[in-house]
Amino acid sequence: MGIVAFALGLIVGSFVNVCIYRLPRRESVVWPGSHCPHCQAPIRWYDNIPLLSFALLGGRCRRCRAPISWRYPLVEFLTAALFVQSVAAFGVSLRALQSLVLGTLLLIVFFVDLDHYIIPNRITYPGTVIGLLFAALSDGRVDWRHAAVAAVTALALGGGFVLVNVLSAWILGQEGMGMGDAKLAAMIGAFLGWPIGAVAILMGVFIGGALGVGLLALRLKGRREQIPFGPAMAAGALAAMWWGPGLLNWYLTKMLG
Ligand SMILES: [Zn+2]
């Protein structure tokens, strides 16, 4: 099962790469086929096999020999790892499917936000709808109460970010985060519901804060420089989805004795 999940993940990972490159450039993700960003030569199917082609071509375009970013095989591998982890955490189930769909969307957000400081609406809008559909279908039957909880969580988390933005603009004279972050928070809320959606955002804020302080301390980023928050939220959401229930349980047992 692990091998099947890994192979499927590699194929999807190839498409994740296309999305990461094209979504922020407002290009279609289905047409035209992949081409070398350097010489524009179309990439043949045998040069587009995940991981393998990169290794066989020595990380260079077959025609112009321009180097291909190591990010491509990395993203393919990460997507494959995501698929394996989803099946390991939830078995072959609807929850595993939900886990790998959310994970795939978050992988795209992670790299697009890292490169371009934007979180595409083409991910968060359909992502929120898909998240609510999964919530409605939890346990394999239609559950409107569960969907309603997910919808309220999405509104509350997205609204929370909008509020922080408004307050930050009012008090500090600059927006704390973009609207893309608010829409991402709503999507995560739709997928994970209450309380795990809230745990996800808390973990994202914690990871983002720690990274921000670290980058400033190491002088890798200046005080005025923008640090994208989407990657931290994506990491927090994945951690919360897989380990949040256990973590929450442990915390509540400790707190309540
Ligand atoms: Zn080329």
Image (cartoon, rainbow, N blue to C red):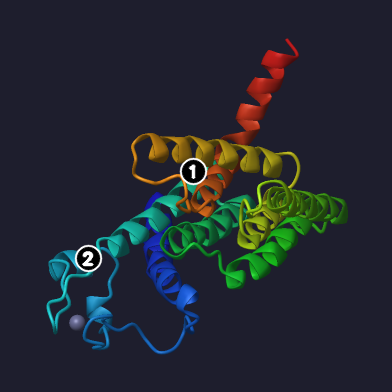
Image point (53%, 38%), residue name: 209
Q: Which residue is mark 1?
A: 88
On-image quarter of the C terminus: top right
Identify residue for label 2.
Answer: 52
Tell which tag, 2 or 1, sits nearer the viewer.
Answer: 2
Which mark sits nearer the N-terminus, 2 or 1?
2
Q: Residues within 10 Å of mark 2 (few under 14, many from 20)?
A: few
Give the residue type at disc 1: Ala
> Residue 72 placed where, x, y %?
31, 65
Q: Quadrant of residue 202?
A: top right
Residue 79, can we see it? yes
Give the image quadrant in which the ligand numbered 1 is located.
bottom left
Apparent side of residue 190 relative to residue 1 in the rendered image (left or right): right
The location of residue 112, given as percent across then percent down, is 46, 64
Q: Nearer the viewer, residue 64 or 254?
A: 64
Task: Estimate the spatial distance between the alpha carbons at disc 2 and disc 1, rounded to whole Å.
Answer: 25 Å
- Image position of 81 (left or right of 207): left
Q: In this view of the protein, which residue sits in the foreground, 167 or 173?
A: 173
Q: Quadrant location of residue 218?
A: top left
Closest to the observer, 247 or 234: 234
